[in-house]
Amino acid sequence: MIWFIVGFLAALGVGLTMMLRSHKPIKEIGLFVTLSCFGCIVWISIFVHHKINPLRWLGWLLDRAGL
């Protein structure tokens, strides 16, 4: 599981770097980070055999962001 977290952080860093260099809006970067973290939470919940359904959290986030 440690390699998954290391790989996730590396991919997140590369993605953020590319988005910042292309001058994406802050809302888009925030949404990218949030969705990535939700994906990471779901995968970690699968690894520890404790299912989490983040769709309710995601719906609340999208409503707050106005998307």
Image (cartoon, grey):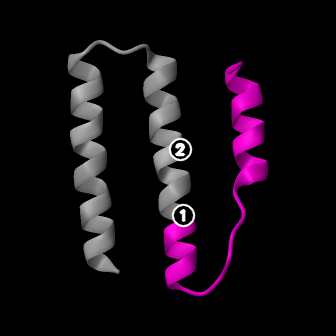
Quarter of image, res 48: bottom right
Residue type at mark 1 is: Ile
When the figure is inspected, residue 3 is found, relative to residue 16, above or below; the finding is below
- Give percent across and percent down for residue 28: 48, 23
Q: Label 2: few (<14), some or many (≥20) within 10 Å?
A: some
- Give percent across and percent down for residue 54: 69, 56
Give the residue at mark 2.
35
When the figure is inspected, residue 56 is found, relative to residue 17, above or below; the finding is below
* C-alpha distance separating marks 2 and 1: 10 Å
Whether residue 35 appears in magenta in the rendering, the answer is: no
- The N terminus, quarter of image: bottom left
Whether residue 57 appears in magenta in the rendering, the answer is: yes
Q: Secondary structure at mark 2?
A: helix
CB under 8 Å between discs 2 and 1: no
Residue type at mark 2 is: Leu
- Give percent across and percent down for residue 45: 57, 75
Q: Which residues are magenta?
A: 42-67
Give the residue at mark 1.
41
Quarter of image, res 46: bottom right
Lower sequence index among marks 2 and 1: 2
Quarter of image, res 42: bottom right
Question: What residue lies at 54% left-to-right and 63% top-to-bottom?
Answer: 41
- Give percent across and percent down for residue 56: 79, 50
Q: Label 1: few (<14), some or many (≥20) within 10 Å?
A: some
Q: Secondary structure at mark 1?
A: helix
Question: What residue lies at 22% left-to-right and 53% top-to-bottom?
Answer: 10
When the figure is inspected, residue 56 is found, relative to residue 30, above or below; the finding is below
